[in-house]
Image (tube, grey):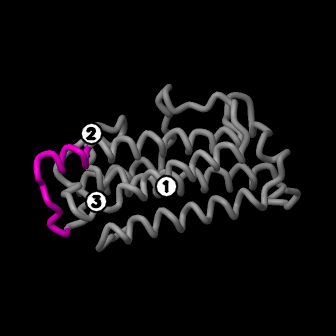
Amino acid sequence: MKFETIEDVYETNDRVRQKLKELLSETSDEQCYQRPEEGKWSIAEIVEHLQMVEHSMVRICAKLLKKAKANGNLNDGNVTFSRIFTERGDEIARMKVEAPEFVRPGGQKSVAESLSAMDEAREMGRELKELFERYNGNIYKFRHPYFGELSAIEWLGLIGSHEMRHIRQIKNILKAAGAGATSSR
């Protein structure tokens, strides 16, 4: 995906979030809390994972932008995703990836609670928009377990692509269950 501006990244992330909310609104409680098979996450656990990850990604973005601000690294207007980031993203999209322990769901939250926490994280991320627009989010990096060193801009873009990956997973769970998304919420 090609982004011209920080606003493009934010808008894409918001469109992906809307897709997730629409999908979940068409999914019954029974479907949300039923495990597709032993050892696999339920839809509710996937959503809990998403909120944990987004909180972590927003904190990482804030840390990297704070460093750019402290060093006076002004934004040059570029929204850059490295070739390695793009290639690794394509590669990871086709493989099963094990979530690090600190972002594995505990099954403690309802879908509504997780969505609410995701909305809070999204608002925290929106508060960073001005920093992204003013300071260079391409310079400083923080290591991702699968992608390697990522810039703040790459972390911001990863929020939406990570969520999209799990939307596909949820759709596959629903399809495998043979029920599709039935409305009972």
The amino acid on which the numbered mark 1 sits, given as a three-letter code, is: Glu
The residue labelled by disc 1 is: 123
Sequence-first tag of 1 and 2:
1
Whether residue 73 is in magenta: the answer is yes
Residue 131 image point, x, y percent: 28, 57
Residue drawn 47% across the image and 42% down it: 55
Which is more toward the observer, 18 or 123?
123
**Residues in magenta?**
64-77
Q: Is residue 98 left or right of residue 37?
A: left
Residue drawn 80% across the image and 59% down it: 180
The amino acid on which the numbered mark 3 sits, given as a three-letter code, is: Phe
Label disc, if present, on residue 180 of the rendered structure:
none
Sequence-first tag of 3 and 2:
3
Question: Does the rendering let one see residue 158?
Answer: yes
Residue 142 image point, x, y percent: 27, 39
Residue 141 image point, x, y percent: 22, 43
Between the residue at mark 3 and the residue at mark 2, the CA separation in whole angstroms equals: 16 Å
The residue labelled by disc 2 is: 142
Which is more toward the observer, 108 or 174?
108
Q: Quadrant of the C terminus?
A: bottom right
Find out whether the residues at labels 1 and 2 contact each other: C-beta distance under 8 Å. Answer: no
Dot in front, 1 or 2: 1
Whether residue 140 is in magenta: the answer is no
